[in-house]
Amino acid sequence: MVVQSTTNYDYTGATAGLMDLLRYLNNYPALGTGIERLANQGHNLLGSELPIEFLKYQVGYQINLIGSYPTDTDVVPSAIFVAAFAVLLFVHLGIFIINCSRHHFFWVSIGWVFYCILRCIGFGLRIPFGKDVTRVPTGIASEVLLILPSIVLVSLNLILAQRIFTWRHPVGGSRKLFWGFMITLYIFVLAIIGMTIACAAIPYIYFLSEGVYLSYKKVVQASAVLILAYSLTAISLIGLAYFFKPTRKDENLYTYQPWWIESFSPFYFVKKGAVYEAEETFMKRNHNHRHAIRVIAATHHHYNMVEGLTNQRGDLSHNWSLGLIAITTLFIFVGSLCRLIVCFQDRYTREQSRLCDPVAMYILWGLLEVIINVLYIVGRVDLRFYRPDILPAKVRAIITAQQSIEQSDASSEFDQYSSEEEISDTESSEGFDLTPNVQKEGFVKNAKELESDYDEEFRF
């Protein structure tokens, strides 16, 4: 059954009487709740095809949504964005496969692939729902899968911002306290997602009283506020990274940057096997180098690098990286803000504002997010935000000598006698009568004394 239009929500008195009868039969629930059960009851009373008047009344008293409830006019734009996100999905997946073939593993790309899948399904489900608004489970799934991808996108942005923070503050960014806070934040967001899905879906499935329905709407409003605040976490973390200057500990700490990345060009890919070549060099390095903090690539830094920079590497500036996160955060924030406004308007669909028009939703969750993904691809975030993999166990297990800035006692004695020998050579050249054999005997004698002092330590 194709519903030609449900945008005109006028209804007759007979329709209102029938709907009131159904409400009284179901213990007179709040308007807008239990639409799935009402649709089933309507099919039992009136057959497989419900009259348009029935649909006008029921859709008109549903809670307003950003994008509203689809009609047959939403089929074409939904199909366009399904195709657009499918193309982006294959591009993200293709870049990930090429990188993996070169042993360059940027696992955040899998997150973008998952995000594009959600967007394709969300817009795809809007097509059958627009043809028949009585498919309530399809509509619920479509609504959830249109809200969820924006939260996933914010989480991926936050991961990128976290890597910039660790690059600028390797000491603070590698502490267990910081990681514990970030993991707790992600878990909290998962709880918000679960709360949003439950409170948004239940009123469509079950009949609720006025008080309970109001409570569910307040929970959805609260989750919208939290999601809006969460959308700003990435830019806030970058702000903290640059508000606080790197400390002396950051400057003195060894970091492990992917020095084999030579460019952030859209068509550049790392040399095949360059990662393994870099890992093999750690076999010859000091033990503390093998436990250096892994950070993203950059030529401007405030701390010691394990590998020196080369002239072939180019200027890998992170100004564009900061711009990418700022622009994408702004686009996501605008979408979250508009959804928040719609939630707090708390109107029936028949009284909805212009923000609930489908065109607004296609711009906020369609066009702007397509631009975000294009920026990710062209800006090569898989290179800009790549952090080297942890070194293999065979490399980390090697224990080598540590370099020390302290001078050992034996070395001091040797330097002392070397300087005396130089003085002796100078004095003999000036005419003083010195016997070289005496000096050699004295050096050997003192060397034996050193050996006797430390022979207990080196005896097995």
Image (cartoon, rainbow, N blue to C red):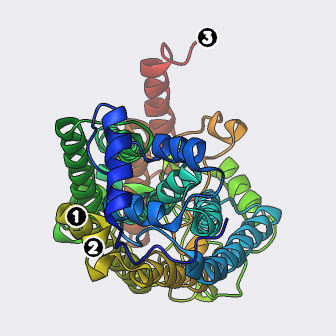
Asked if residue 33 is positioned above or below residue 166 in the image, the reply reads above
**CB atoms at circles 1 and 2 under 8 Å apart?**
yes
| Tag in front: 1 or 3 | 1
Q: Is residue 241 visible?
A: no
**CB atoms at circles 2 and 3 under 8 Å apart?**
no
Q: CA distance from mark 1 to mark 2?
A: 6 Å
Question: x, y (%) of residue 278?
Answer: 69, 61
What amino acid type should be assigned to the residue bearing mark 2? Gln
Asked if residue 263 is positioned above or below residue 419 in the image, the reply reads below
Q: Say few, some or many: other residues with alpha carbon within 10 Å of mark 2 (under 14 / 14 to 19 / 20 or more).
A: some
For label 2, the SS is: loop
| Residue sitting nearer the eye, 313 or 41 | 41
Identity of the residue drawn at 39% across and 82% down: 360
Point out which mark residue 460 bears: 3
Residue under label 2: 352
Point out which mark residue 347 bears: 1
